[in-house]
Amino acid sequence: MKIHYSHQAIIAGLLTTTASLLIGGLQAINFFPQIAISSTILYFIIFKNLAQGGSIFHPAPLVALIMIWSLAISPLASIVWGKYILYVPKNIEWEPWLIYTSWVYTACTIALLTGISLTWNEKSDPLPAWEVNRSTLPIISLTFLAITLLIQAYIFMSFGGIYGYLVQWTEQKESFKGLGSTFMLAEAFPILLLISFVLFTDREKVREKIGLIYALLIIFFLLKLLFGGFRGSRSNTIWGIFWAAGIIHLVYFKLKLRHYLIGLAFLLSFMVSYAVYKSFGVEAFSGEYTVEDSGRFDGNPVAGILLEDFSRSTVHAYTLHEYFDSDSYNVKLGATYLNSLFKMLPWMDNPFPDSKNTAGAELFYGRTIDPVLSYGRIRNSRVFGLYGEGLLNFGPALPILLFIGAGVLIGKINNFCLRLQAEDPRTLLIPFIANGCLVLILSDSDNLVFFIMKNGFMAFLMIFLISMRPKPITSMSQP
């Protein structure tokens, strides 16, 4: 008998909660109801969408899967592993504030479900499919590929070749400033090449050559390293591989559990080894340095990655503590979001100098920062996420409602993706769109703007230009 997705969610939620209790011991008792409620809700979102034909590469299931860790489990994991914020300005009593944070997360999870539920449509007809214009495809595709490849070649030549590029990044990172638009164009080459390969070749014939598909992934990974990966951006490579894997899943064959496990192992290995390169640059290839030398993960690389890259629990616990402990912090009333939007217009002076960097530094360090006098000079590597940036702008309660809006947006985008037909070229953009929805929850508004413009603009533009839209059906009225 087929188990309904709501029953699957309850069972999975109970298993997750039980595992957390067994691993966390007495420390897990204070997190029991939060983990049970949040994980069950998130599993419900996943299983319902899978039942509707979705996959891990669709927006709602991807967001819910990562949030099982980020919202449901990570506050407890921080206490169990004893890992909190690196280089924290001051020590606080972490456990009670992580408990408060977990309750906030439970409310955020309920709000997310509420928003997504408002968009659910049990019966959705497929969207009219866009078609590839075969007459313009070669010209447009080759033009995009040539432009991006030549720009990247120019970048390498400007720094004395690939090795000179690596040395320059190692020794003088400031020399890369002002090249953002150039990198945006050049680093689109790998995904444009993969999309072009899919559009030019016969899917059925490629599907029969499993070795070719694996070779595509390896080549894509190496190209991502050359086109931006060696510039110190792990996410540039990781999310690119996610996009490529999603295209393979949606176009050629459904990935199986073993593929996901291999991908997860590769992800963790890459992020650990890349920390050495990010710390020592080209010298990392000498083999003289280890991840311990980088000092990035404080002894446990896996825990560091999970709690620093895929969780904001300790950042939120600390900002909550500082917000209630401070009598001088003034909420920014949406200014950081407007600051991020105006970053899309680099030729204009930004009329909203309050960024998440200045606001976060002000709350973290307990001193007022003039965003005009300090504009452009505040450097903050901390990421606050949807809830954290909301707290900087509106205080601790209102940001929970942002998850309703995020849920509505993610739900509508997810419905759109589910309605795309397999032959529609827009299907190739689904993994990127899902990734963007995750960035919306896990990162800040400036990260989201940067992610969309840098990683998606060229691919969206090429798909738009090579596609033919279906003509609307008009009825002929009788006179």
Image (cartoon, grey):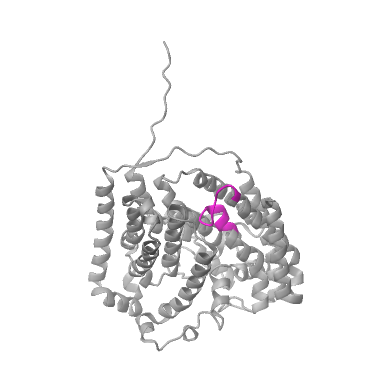
**Residue toward you, 169 or 360:** 169
Q: Quadrant of the C terminus?
A: top left
Q: Is residue 55 magenta?
A: yes
Q: Position of residue 135 (x, y in %)?
A: 26, 42
Kindly identify the residue that appears in the image at 24 percent across and 57 percent down.
Answer: 146
Looking at the image, residue 332 lies above or below residue 281: above
- Left or right: 407, with 479 as reference point: right
- Left or right: 397, with 158 as reference point: right
* Residue 326 at least partly seen: no
* Residue 105 at least partly seen: yes
- Left or right: 442, with 197 as reference point: right
Q: Position of residue 346 (x, y in %)?
A: 37, 56
Q: Is residue 367 magenta?
A: no
The magenta stretch spans which residues? 51-64
Residue farthest to the top, as pictured: 479
Kindly identify the residue that appears in the image at 63 percent across and 71 percent down.
Answer: 318
Q: Position of residue 183 (x, y in %)?
A: 33, 63
Q: Position of residue 232 (x, y in %)?
A: 40, 72
**Residue toward you, 298 or 351:** 298
